[in-house]
Image (spheres, grey):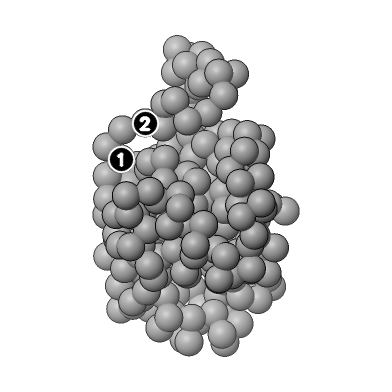
Amino acid sequence: MRKILFPLLGLVAVNVISAWLVGLAVSRPVLADAQSRLAITQDDRIFGNPDAPITIVEYASLTCPHCAHFANDVLPELKKRWIDTGKAKLVLRDFPLDEPALRAAMIARCAPPDRFYAYVDTFFATQDKWVMARDYREALARLVKLGGMSKEQFDKCLKNTALENKIVEERLVASKELDVNSTPTFFINGTKFTGAPTVEEFDKVLSDLSAKS
């Protein structure tokens, strides 16, 4: 998994940075009941049947190659075995590791909710192209145009400071209260997944949970 190399300083409004620094100055215990932080909210985008008994929460960065590997090579098989069958659902939460990841996350969040995962899939499938582009914003703008987002909508989205601050604040909460320190990080029914992010390892955990339900 890809480790965090640097904080997202300079990417948020001054009030968010100030709040973060104040928080660092006070010793805060790790959230005793992670379930409350991992509970599905109206801001989450659910992939699969919302009533599926198993919930996989993934914290990911859209510029993380390991996250792209999971999305491109592992998730399709899990989708067939667990998500399409109604046994599990996936919730991807943003944990941007750098500015391009933050901007891409904003764009996906600006898309209609039912198009969120289509945008995410596209960003992961073409990650090596837009991340390495001379102008990643221009590359992203070309990608989302194919998905129906106009240049005006694209520009407006990237100026949405409320959305920007929300994504970064949620990233900080995940880091401080859920001990998310690398991507991808998974929680399955509230328990941190510690195995390798392979189909086989997920199958073991999901099968055990399914047998108990």
Q: Is residue 109 visible?
A: no
Tell me where residue 61 appears, x and y as whole percent. 41, 52
**Disc 1 secondary structure class:** loop
What residue type is disc 1 on? Ile
Residue 21, placed above or below residue 3: above
- Horizontally, residue 52 falls left or right of residue 82, namely right
Tell me where residue 34 appears, x and y as whole percent. 53, 45
Residue found 55% across the figure and 75% down from its top = 88
Q: Is residue 13 visible?
A: yes
Q: Are marks 1 and 2 in contact (CB under 8 Å)?
A: yes
Callout 2 crowding tier (Cα within 10 Å): few <14, some 14–19, many ≥20: few
Residue 56, placed above or below residue 207: above
Nearer to me, 44 or 212: 44
Q: Which quadrant of the figure has residue 64? A: bottom left
Q: Quadrant of the N terminus?
A: bottom left
Where residue 4 is drawn, which disc sits there? 1
Callout 1 crowding tier (Cα within 10 Å): few <14, some 14–19, many ≥20: some
Tell me where residue 210 appears, x and y as whole percent. 51, 78
What residue type is disc 2 on? Pro
Where residue 7 is drawn, which disc sits there? 2
Q: CA distance from mark 1 to mark 2?
A: 7 Å
